[in-house]
Image (spheres, rainbow, N blue to C red):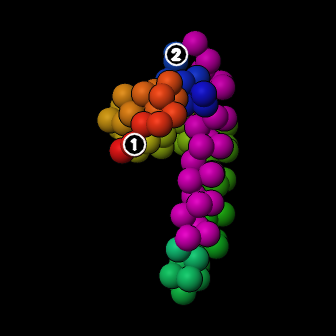
Amino acid sequence: MTLEIIETQNYKNTKQWLSYWVIVMIVHLLDDYFYWILYYLPYYHFMKFIFFVLLFHPKTQFAEHFYDAVFHKCYVNYQKYIYSSKRNPSFNY
């Protein structure tokens, strides 16, 4: 549902915040999974903090731009699988 709203052009301000939360959740999942590697990177937490500030700052609109540059392509490529599995719960990849 969130990806459907992001892809529509009717909600300009909503796209920024929904893109922000989608990116935050993906970063959180990757952070949990790869923390044992990321822990050893110098200044990792500081870089993550700067990234999140860029994401939510209203003047940069970075969440929207980052979503369009990275996740939009993935969404378009897998859109048919997302919607077919939503209608057919027994769908196997």
Q: Is residue 68 visible?
A: no
The quarter of the picture where the C terminus appears is top left
Task: Indicate the position of residue 89 as horizontal and vertical percent values.
Answer: 51, 34
Task: Indicate the position of residue 92 as horizontal and vertical percent values.
Answer: 39, 42
Write the residue at 54% across / 42% down.
62
Position above or below: 25 against 11: below
Write the residue at 54% across / 78% down.
38
Three-letter code, disc 1: Asn
Q: Which residues are magenta?
A: 10-33
Task: Indicate the position of residue 16 as horizontal and vertical percent values.
Answer: 61, 33
Which mark is first along the chain, 1 or 2?
2
Tell me the number on the disc at residue 55: none
Would you say the magenta stretch is mainly helix, strand or loop? helix
**In the orientation shown, which residue stands out farthest toward the left?**
77
Tell me the number on the disc at residue 92: 1
- The residue lying toward the viewer, choosing from 91 and 37, is 91
Q: Secondary structure at mark 1?
A: loop
Q: Decide if residue 14 is on the left or right side of residue 62.
A: right
Position above or below: 62 against 2: below
Write the residue at 52% across / 29% down.
86
Q: Please name the residue that numbered disc 2 is placed on.
A: 9
The quarter of the picture where the N terminus appears is top right
